[in-house]
Image: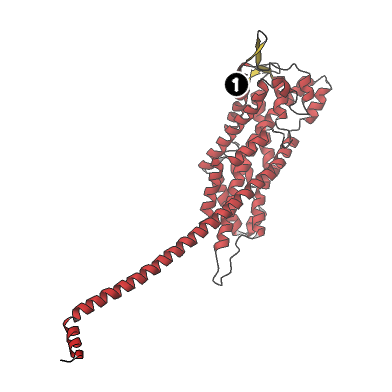
Amino acid sequence: MTMFARIQAFLYRHRRKFIISGILIGSAVLASRYAQKKLREWQEKETKEFLERTRRQHHFESTERTCNQTILSLIPTIREAVIKILDTEDLVIRLRSDPPDKLSLWEELKIKAFTRASVLVYAGAMLVVALRIQLNLIGGYMYQDSTSETDEGARAPHISSTLQHNYLSLCHHFVNEGIHELCSLVEEKVHLIVEGTSLKQQLNLQDTEQLFWAIQAAVTGDLRDPIKCLARYILPPDHPATADCDTLQKMVSETMDLLESDEVLSLTSSCVSQGFSLMVDRISDYYGPAANKAALNVNAGTSGLQNKTQIPNSGLGHSNGLATFVHPNNVAMPMAKLIPIVNGLVQHQIGHGGGPDLWIQQLILNEKLKLLGANVYEAFSNK
Protein backbone atom coordinates (compact mmCIF):
# COMPACT_ATOMS: atom_id res chain seq x y z
CA MET A 1 0.00 0.00 0.00
CA THR A 2 1.35 3.32 -1.05
CA MET A 3 1.91 6.21 1.37
CA PHE A 4 -0.98 8.15 -0.15
CA ALA A 5 -3.31 5.23 0.25
CA ARG A 6 -2.30 4.76 3.89
CA ILE A 7 -2.95 8.44 4.61
CA GLN A 8 -6.29 8.24 2.84
CA ALA A 9 -7.24 5.16 4.84
CA PHE A 10 -6.18 6.85 8.09
CA LEU A 11 -8.29 9.88 7.33
CA TYR A 12 -11.24 7.72 6.39
CA ARG A 13 -11.01 5.70 9.61
CA HIS A 14 -10.82 8.85 11.76
CA ARG A 15 -13.04 11.05 9.64
CA ARG A 16 -15.62 11.53 12.44
CA LYS A 17 -12.91 12.69 14.84
CA PHE A 18 -11.59 15.17 12.31
CA ILE A 19 -15.06 16.51 11.57
CA ILE A 20 -15.88 16.95 15.24
CA SER A 21 -12.46 18.48 15.94
CA GLY A 22 -12.91 20.86 13.04
CA ILE A 23 -16.32 21.89 14.25
CA LEU A 24 -14.99 22.44 17.78
CA ILE A 25 -11.97 24.42 16.62
CA GLY A 26 -14.07 26.49 14.22
CA SER A 27 -16.63 27.15 16.92
CA ALA A 28 -13.89 28.16 19.34
CA VAL A 29 -12.44 30.57 16.79
CA LEU A 30 -15.85 32.05 16.03
CA ALA A 31 -16.67 32.28 19.74
CA SER A 32 -13.34 33.97 20.41
CA ARG A 33 -13.89 36.48 17.63
CA TYR A 34 -17.46 37.12 18.84
CA ALA A 35 -16.25 37.59 22.41
CA GLN A 36 -13.53 39.98 21.22
CA LYS A 37 -16.11 41.94 19.25
CA LYS A 38 -18.48 42.16 22.21
CA LEU A 39 -15.61 43.13 24.49
CA ARG A 40 -14.66 45.94 22.10
CA GLU A 41 -18.29 47.06 21.92
CA TRP A 42 -18.57 46.99 25.72
CA GLN A 43 -15.32 48.94 26.09
CA GLU A 44 -16.49 51.49 23.52
CA LYS A 45 -19.86 51.77 25.26
CA GLU A 46 -18.21 52.20 28.68
CA THR A 47 -15.81 54.79 27.28
CA LYS A 48 -18.67 56.66 25.62
CA GLU A 49 -20.74 56.58 28.80
CA PHE A 50 -17.77 57.74 30.86
CA LEU A 51 -17.13 60.61 28.49
CA GLU A 52 -20.85 61.41 28.51
CA ARG A 53 -20.96 61.44 32.31
CA THR A 54 -17.83 63.58 32.45
CA ARG A 55 -19.23 66.00 29.90
CA ARG A 56 -22.56 66.18 31.71
CA GLN A 57 -20.81 66.70 35.05
CA HIS A 58 -18.73 69.55 33.62
CA HIS A 59 -21.82 71.12 32.09
CA PHE A 60 -23.72 70.79 35.36
CA GLU A 61 -20.85 72.35 37.32
CA SER A 62 -20.78 75.19 34.81
CA THR A 63 -24.54 75.63 35.28
CA GLU A 64 -24.08 75.71 39.06
CA ARG A 65 -21.42 78.41 38.78
CA THR A 66 -23.68 80.44 36.53
CA CYS A 67 -26.52 79.98 39.02
CA ASN A 68 -24.39 81.19 41.93
CA GLN A 69 -23.16 84.19 39.96
CA THR A 70 -26.74 85.05 38.97
CA ILE A 71 -27.86 84.86 42.60
CA LEU A 72 -25.04 87.12 43.75
CA SER A 73 -25.76 89.61 40.97
CA LEU A 74 -29.51 89.81 41.69
CA ILE A 75 -29.38 89.96 45.49
CA PRO A 76 -28.09 93.57 45.60
CA THR A 77 -30.98 94.55 43.31
CA ILE A 78 -33.45 92.86 45.66
CA ARG A 79 -31.87 94.54 48.64
CA GLU A 80 -31.97 97.96 47.00
CA ALA A 81 -35.62 97.43 46.11
CA VAL A 82 -36.54 96.46 49.69
CA ILE A 83 -34.62 99.39 51.17
CA LYS A 84 -36.28 101.75 48.71
CA ILE A 85 -39.78 100.41 49.41
CA LEU A 86 -39.23 100.37 53.17
CA ASP A 87 -37.02 103.43 53.46
CA THR A 88 -35.99 104.27 57.03
CA GLU A 89 -33.28 106.84 56.36
CA ASP A 90 -35.70 109.76 56.44
CA LEU A 91 -37.16 108.52 59.73
CA VAL A 92 -33.70 108.28 61.28
CA ILE A 93 -32.80 111.81 60.16
CA ARG A 94 -36.04 113.21 61.56
CA LEU A 95 -35.59 111.39 64.87
CA ARG A 96 -32.13 112.90 65.30
CA SER A 97 -33.68 116.36 65.31
CA ASP A 98 -35.82 115.43 68.36
CA PRO A 99 -39.20 116.27 66.73
CA PRO A 100 -42.44 116.61 68.72
CA ASP A 101 -43.93 113.53 67.03
CA LYS A 102 -40.92 111.32 67.79
CA LEU A 103 -43.09 108.60 69.39
CA SER A 104 -45.03 108.03 66.19
CA LEU A 105 -41.78 108.12 64.20
CA TRP A 106 -40.29 105.48 66.49
CA GLU A 107 -43.36 103.32 65.98
CA GLU A 108 -43.06 103.66 62.22
CA LEU A 109 -39.34 102.88 62.36
CA LYS A 110 -40.10 99.81 64.47
CA ILE A 111 -42.52 98.44 61.88
CA LYS A 112 -40.22 99.10 58.94
CA ALA A 113 -37.10 97.75 60.64
CA PHE A 114 -38.69 94.39 61.46
CA THR A 115 -40.40 94.28 58.07
CA ARG A 116 -37.14 94.82 56.19
CA ALA A 117 -35.37 92.10 58.13
CA SER A 118 -38.22 89.63 57.55
CA VAL A 119 -38.67 90.48 53.88
CA LEU A 120 -35.00 89.92 53.10
CA VAL A 121 -35.14 86.49 54.72
CA TYR A 122 -38.14 85.51 52.58
CA ALA A 123 -36.81 87.17 49.43
CA GLY A 124 -33.43 85.46 49.70
CA ALA A 125 -34.93 82.00 50.07
CA MET A 126 -37.49 82.53 47.32
CA LEU A 127 -34.98 83.92 44.83
CA VAL A 128 -32.35 81.21 45.41
CA VAL A 129 -34.90 78.38 45.14
CA ALA A 130 -36.40 79.85 41.96
CA LEU A 131 -33.02 80.40 40.30
CA ARG A 132 -31.81 76.91 41.25
CA ILE A 133 -34.83 75.51 39.45
CA GLN A 134 -34.73 77.85 36.45
CA LEU A 135 -31.01 77.64 35.73
CA ASN A 136 -30.85 73.86 36.08
CA LEU A 137 -34.02 73.34 34.06
CA ILE A 138 -32.72 75.35 31.14
CA GLY A 139 -29.28 73.80 31.66
CA GLY A 140 -30.82 70.37 31.19
CA TYR A 141 -32.55 71.50 28.00
CA MET A 142 -29.32 73.00 26.67
CA TYR A 143 -27.42 69.79 27.39
CA GLN A 144 -30.04 67.86 25.45
CA ASP A 145 -29.54 70.18 22.50
CA SER A 146 -25.78 69.77 22.64
CA THR A 147 -26.09 65.98 22.29
CA SER A 148 -28.99 65.76 19.81
CA GLU A 149 -28.36 65.58 16.08
CA THR A 150 -30.64 65.84 13.07
CA ASP A 151 -30.65 63.39 10.17
CA GLU A 152 -28.15 65.58 8.33
CA GLY A 153 -25.76 65.37 11.27
CA ALA A 154 -26.20 68.98 12.37
CA ARG A 155 -27.18 69.82 15.90
CA ALA A 156 -30.73 70.97 16.46
CA PRO A 157 -30.77 74.36 18.27
CA HIS A 158 -34.09 74.13 20.09
CA ILE A 159 -32.97 76.49 22.87
CA SER A 160 -31.97 79.68 21.11
CA SER A 161 -30.29 82.59 22.85
CA THR A 162 -33.55 84.56 22.51
CA LEU A 163 -35.51 81.78 24.18
CA GLN A 164 -32.92 81.60 26.97
CA HIS A 165 -33.19 85.35 27.52
CA ASN A 166 -37.00 85.29 27.56
CA TYR A 167 -37.12 82.38 29.98
CA LEU A 168 -34.53 83.74 32.42
CA SER A 169 -36.08 87.20 32.31
CA LEU A 170 -39.19 85.76 33.98
CA CYS A 171 -37.54 86.17 37.39
CA HIS A 172 -37.55 89.95 36.85
CA HIS A 173 -41.23 89.81 37.76
CA PHE A 174 -40.19 89.04 41.33
CA VAL A 175 -37.59 91.82 41.34
CA ASN A 176 -39.97 94.41 39.90
CA GLU A 177 -43.41 93.43 41.18
CA GLY A 178 -43.35 90.37 43.41
CA ILE A 179 -41.11 92.09 45.95
CA HIS A 180 -43.67 94.90 46.34
CA GLU A 181 -46.40 92.38 47.12
CA LEU A 182 -44.10 90.58 49.53
CA CYS A 183 -43.22 93.82 51.35
CA SER A 184 -46.89 94.76 51.64
CA LEU A 185 -47.86 91.36 53.09
CA VAL A 186 -45.00 91.17 55.58
CA GLU A 187 -45.46 94.77 56.71
CA GLU A 188 -49.12 94.04 57.41
CA LYS A 189 -48.20 91.04 59.58
CA VAL A 190 -45.32 92.81 61.33
CA HIS A 191 -47.69 95.64 62.25
CA LEU A 192 -50.01 93.15 63.94
CA ILE A 193 -47.20 91.42 65.82
CA VAL A 194 -45.03 94.30 67.09
CA GLU A 195 -47.65 97.05 67.39
CA GLY A 196 -48.37 96.15 71.00
CA THR A 197 -44.72 96.03 72.03
CA SER A 198 -43.82 99.22 73.88
CA LEU A 199 -40.56 101.01 73.07
CA LYS A 200 -39.65 100.71 76.76
CA GLN A 201 -40.43 97.01 77.00
CA GLN A 202 -37.36 94.97 77.95
CA LEU A 203 -36.66 92.12 75.55
CA ASN A 204 -34.17 89.32 76.01
CA LEU A 205 -32.91 87.17 73.17
CA GLN A 206 -35.75 84.66 73.52
CA ASP A 207 -38.30 87.46 73.34
CA THR A 208 -36.69 88.75 70.16
CA GLU A 209 -36.70 85.26 68.67
CA GLN A 210 -40.38 84.88 69.52
CA LEU A 211 -41.16 88.10 67.66
CA PHE A 212 -39.62 86.75 64.47
CA TRP A 213 -41.30 83.34 64.84
CA ALA A 214 -44.64 85.11 65.38
CA ILE A 215 -44.09 87.12 62.19
CA GLN A 216 -43.31 83.94 60.25
CA ALA A 217 -46.37 82.19 61.67
CA ALA A 218 -48.60 85.14 60.76
CA VAL A 219 -47.30 85.16 57.18
CA THR A 220 -47.69 81.38 56.89
CA GLY A 221 -51.32 81.60 58.02
CA ASP A 222 -52.24 84.04 55.27
CA LEU A 223 -53.66 82.90 51.92
CA ARG A 224 -51.02 85.07 50.25
CA ASP A 225 -48.21 83.15 51.95
CA PRO A 226 -45.19 83.61 49.63
CA ILE A 227 -44.10 80.02 50.18
CA LYS A 228 -47.41 78.42 49.25
CA CYS A 229 -47.84 80.94 46.42
CA LEU A 230 -44.20 80.86 45.34
CA ALA A 231 -45.00 80.56 41.63
CA ARG A 232 -47.28 83.61 41.77
CA TYR A 233 -44.57 85.79 43.28
CA ILE A 234 -41.80 84.54 40.97
CA LEU A 235 -43.51 84.13 37.59
CA PRO A 236 -45.57 86.78 35.80
CA PRO A 237 -49.25 85.91 35.23
CA ASP A 238 -48.70 86.25 31.49
CA HIS A 239 -45.65 86.75 29.32
CA PRO A 240 -45.96 87.98 25.68
CA ALA A 241 -43.11 85.82 24.43
CA THR A 242 -44.72 82.57 25.60
CA ALA A 243 -47.65 83.04 23.24
CA ASP A 244 -45.41 82.55 20.20
CA CYS A 245 -43.18 79.77 21.47
CA ASP A 246 -44.42 76.32 22.43
CA THR A 247 -41.06 75.39 23.94
CA LEU A 248 -41.08 78.44 26.21
CA GLN A 249 -44.67 77.74 27.23
CA LYS A 250 -43.67 74.19 28.11
CA MET A 251 -40.66 75.38 30.14
CA VAL A 252 -42.75 77.92 32.06
CA SER A 253 -45.37 75.25 32.80
CA GLU A 254 -42.70 72.84 34.03
CA THR A 255 -41.15 75.58 36.19
CA MET A 256 -44.53 76.36 37.72
CA ASP A 257 -45.12 72.68 38.49
CA LEU A 258 -41.77 72.49 40.27
CA LEU A 259 -42.38 75.70 42.25
CA GLU A 260 -45.72 74.33 43.41
CA SER A 261 -44.43 70.86 44.31
CA ASP A 262 -44.57 69.76 47.94
CA GLU A 263 -40.83 69.09 48.00
CA VAL A 264 -39.95 72.62 46.91
CA LEU A 265 -42.49 74.24 49.25
CA SER A 266 -41.15 72.24 52.20
CA LEU A 267 -37.56 73.09 51.32
CA THR A 268 -38.34 76.79 50.94
CA SER A 269 -40.13 76.84 54.28
CA SER A 270 -37.12 75.18 55.91
CA CYS A 271 -34.80 77.77 54.36
CA VAL A 272 -36.95 80.65 55.66
CA SER A 273 -36.83 79.18 59.17
CA GLN A 274 -33.05 78.95 58.92
CA GLY A 275 -32.96 82.56 57.77
CA PHE A 276 -34.83 83.77 60.84
CA SER A 277 -32.52 81.69 63.05
CA LEU A 278 -29.53 83.34 61.43
CA MET A 279 -31.08 86.77 61.95
CA VAL A 280 -31.53 86.03 65.64
CA ASP A 281 -27.94 84.75 65.83
CA ARG A 282 -26.72 88.04 64.37
CA ILE A 283 -28.79 89.99 66.88
CA SER A 284 -27.43 87.83 69.71
CA ASP A 285 -24.03 89.44 69.10
CA TYR A 286 -25.45 92.60 70.65
CA TYR A 287 -26.57 90.73 73.74
CA GLY A 288 -23.12 89.29 74.36
CA PRO A 289 -19.93 90.57 75.99
CA ALA A 290 -19.18 92.87 73.05
CA ALA A 291 -22.63 94.49 73.13
CA ASN A 292 -21.46 97.92 74.27
CA LYS A 293 -19.01 98.27 71.43
CA ALA A 294 -21.19 96.58 68.78
CA ALA A 295 -24.28 98.59 69.60
CA LEU A 296 -22.42 101.80 68.90
CA ASN A 297 -21.38 100.57 65.46
CA VAL A 298 -24.48 98.87 64.05
CA ASN A 299 -24.33 101.18 61.05
CA ALA A 300 -23.67 104.80 60.23
CA GLY A 301 -27.35 105.54 59.66
CA THR A 302 -28.55 104.64 63.15
CA SER A 303 -25.56 105.18 65.43
CA GLY A 304 -26.91 108.58 66.41
CA LEU A 305 -30.02 106.92 67.81
CA GLN A 306 -27.91 104.43 69.74
CA ASN A 307 -25.93 107.21 71.41
CA LYS A 308 -29.09 108.80 72.80
CA THR A 309 -30.09 105.66 74.64
CA GLN A 310 -28.27 103.96 77.48
CA ILE A 311 -26.36 100.93 76.23
CA PRO A 312 -27.83 97.65 77.56
CA ASN A 313 -26.08 95.29 79.90
CA SER A 314 -23.03 93.97 78.09
CA GLY A 315 -23.51 90.41 79.26
CA LEU A 316 -20.70 90.67 81.79
CA GLY A 317 -21.47 90.71 85.49
CA HIS A 318 -18.96 91.75 88.11
CA SER A 319 -18.06 89.98 91.30
CA ASN A 320 -15.20 91.32 93.44
CA GLY A 321 -13.91 93.24 90.45
CA LEU A 322 -13.77 90.14 88.19
CA ALA A 323 -15.91 89.79 85.08
CA THR A 324 -18.32 86.85 85.08
CA PHE A 325 -20.20 85.53 82.07
CA VAL A 326 -23.93 86.17 81.86
CA HIS A 327 -25.92 84.15 79.32
CA PRO A 328 -27.43 86.34 76.54
CA ASN A 329 -30.90 85.05 77.46
CA ASN A 330 -30.46 86.71 80.83
CA VAL A 331 -29.62 90.07 79.24
CA ALA A 332 -32.45 92.40 78.22
CA MET A 333 -32.63 95.61 76.26
CA PRO A 334 -35.54 97.97 75.53
CA MET A 335 -37.32 97.74 72.20
CA ALA A 336 -36.02 101.25 71.43
CA LYS A 337 -32.48 99.84 71.60
CA LEU A 338 -33.33 96.76 69.51
CA ILE A 339 -34.89 98.72 66.63
CA PRO A 340 -31.63 100.34 65.38
CA ILE A 341 -29.88 96.97 65.62
CA VAL A 342 -32.50 95.21 63.48
CA ASN A 343 -32.60 98.13 61.08
CA GLY A 344 -28.80 98.13 60.78
CA LEU A 345 -28.56 94.44 59.90
CA VAL A 346 -30.20 95.02 56.52
CA GLN A 347 -28.25 98.04 55.33
CA HIS A 348 -26.81 97.59 51.88
CA GLN A 349 -23.17 97.62 52.89
CA ILE A 350 -21.79 94.72 50.92
CA GLY A 351 -18.96 92.85 52.58
CA HIS A 352 -19.50 94.30 56.06
CA GLY A 353 -20.69 91.00 57.54
CA GLY A 354 -24.38 91.93 57.57
CA GLY A 355 -27.02 89.27 58.16
CA PRO A 356 -28.41 89.14 54.62
CA ASP A 357 -24.95 88.65 53.03
CA LEU A 358 -24.16 85.74 55.32
CA TRP A 359 -27.70 84.51 54.70
CA ILE A 360 -27.18 84.35 50.95
CA GLN A 361 -23.87 82.56 51.40
CA GLN A 362 -25.64 79.94 53.51
CA LEU A 363 -28.29 79.48 50.83
CA ILE A 364 -25.69 79.08 48.09
CA LEU A 365 -23.87 76.42 50.14
CA ASN A 366 -27.07 74.69 51.29
CA GLU A 367 -26.69 70.99 50.40
CA LYS A 368 -30.43 70.39 50.04
CA LEU A 369 -30.72 73.25 47.56
CA LYS A 370 -27.73 71.89 45.64
CA LEU A 371 -29.42 68.49 45.54
CA LEU A 372 -32.62 70.10 44.28
CA GLY A 373 -30.69 71.73 41.44
CA ALA A 374 -28.91 68.46 40.61
CA ASN A 375 -32.20 66.55 40.51
CA VAL A 376 -33.80 69.13 38.22
CA TYR A 377 -30.79 69.10 35.91
CA GLU A 378 -30.70 65.30 35.81
CA ALA A 379 -34.41 65.08 35.05
CA PHE A 380 -34.34 67.55 32.15
CA SER A 381 -31.00 66.51 30.64
CA ASN A 382 -32.21 62.93 30.29
CA LYS A 383 -35.67 63.62 28.82
Q: Residue furthest right?
A: 97
> How far from the left and from the top, in percent, is residue 225?
59, 36
Look at the picture and state if 123 lies above or below 169: above
> How far from the left and from the top, in percent, is residue 242?
63, 55
- The quadrant in which the N terminus is found is bottom left
Look at the picture and state if 49 lies above or below 71: below
Q: Residue at x 61, y 41 (%)?
A: 364
Drawn side of residue 42 relative to residue 258, left or right: left
Quadrant of res 339: top right
Q: Amino acid at mark 1?
A: Gln
Quadrant of res 74: top right
Quadrant of res 16: bottom left
Q: Is residue 141 visible?
A: yes
Look at the picture and state if 230 lies above or below 117: below
> How far from the left and from the top, in percent, is residue 168?
65, 51
Residue that carries the numbered disc 1 in the rendered image: 206
Around disc 1, counting alpha carbons within 10 Å, would you say few (fewer than 14), some (14 to 19), or many (20 or more)? Answer: some
Q: Residue furthest top?
A: 320
Secondary structure type for disc 1:
helix
> How far from the left and from the top, in percent, is residue 131?
62, 46
Q: How was this image coloured? A: secondary structure
Drawn side of residue 250 relative to residue 314, left or right: left
Relative depth, front residue between 172 and 26? 26
Q: Is residue 110 visible?
A: no
Q: Residue at x 73, y 17 (%)?
A: 311
